[in-house]
Image: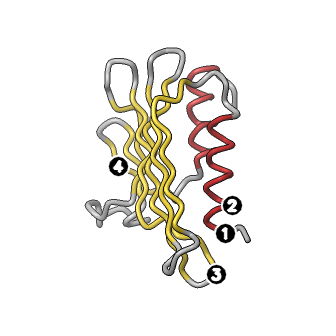
Amino acid sequence: MKTQIHRYLARLYDTIRSRREINVETLEIIDRSDQPGQTGMLHARLRFYDGSLLEVVEVLAIQGLAIVKARYVYHYQDAQGNLVFRYDNAPHHPEVASHPHHKHVGRQVIAADPPDLSQVLREIDERLYGVP
């Protein structure tokens, strides 16, 4: 029987692999959803045509009936290594209303809900292709 985390990780895998224009440098999935504690993890490095890079880390757990991103980072940088944006839930910005969830845009830190990988890829598409 496929668990909730297993299905979620499979969806992330399918989302990444469906994007043929992206060079997948790293794609590591750890699925421990069949063990007590039901956890999972995804780490991906995705390179775009312009040399920009998205690094994704999601550490997953089950809380009640829901999947929780215990830790996440979606770090997008340009080809020169300059930060474009980063979503994360590191608890180092207590002043942000959505603490610990936030988004770095350049040097600015703003409130943000935890995004989904598809949402982050759409945000990058807007930047690269002008596609809303």
Q: Residue furthest right?
A: 1
Q: Which residue carries the number 1 mark?
A: 4
C-alpha gap between disc 1 and disc 3: 9 Å
Going by the image, does 36 lie left or right of 104?
A: right
Quarter of the image for residue 129 reads top right
The foreground one among 127 and 19 is: 19
**Residue tagged by mark 3?**
65
- Give residue 58's position: percent from left, percent from top: 47, 55
Residue labelled with disc 2:
7
Q: CA distance from mark 2 to mark 3?
A: 14 Å
Instruction: Say above or below: 44 vs 6.
Output: above
**Dot 2: within a 10 Å radius of its alpha carbon, few (fewer than 14), some, or many (20 or more) residues?**
few
3D distance between C-alphas at marks 3 and 4 = 31 Å
Please state which of residues 28 and 95 is positioned toward the viewer in this rendering.
28
The amino acid beneath tag 2 is Arg
Q: Residue at x 50, y 81 (%)?
A: 36
CA–CA distance in space, label 4 to label 1: 32 Å
Residue lying at the far top in this picture: please name it: 50
Q: Is residue 99 above or below residue 63?
A: above
Q: In the image, which is nearer the foreground, mark 2 or mark 3?
A: 2
- First in sequence, mark 2 or 3: give its number: 2
Quarter of the image for the C terminus: give it.
top right
Residue at 47%, 57% in the rendered image: 41
Of callouts 2 and 4, the N-terminal one: 2
Q: Amino acid at mark 4?
A: Val
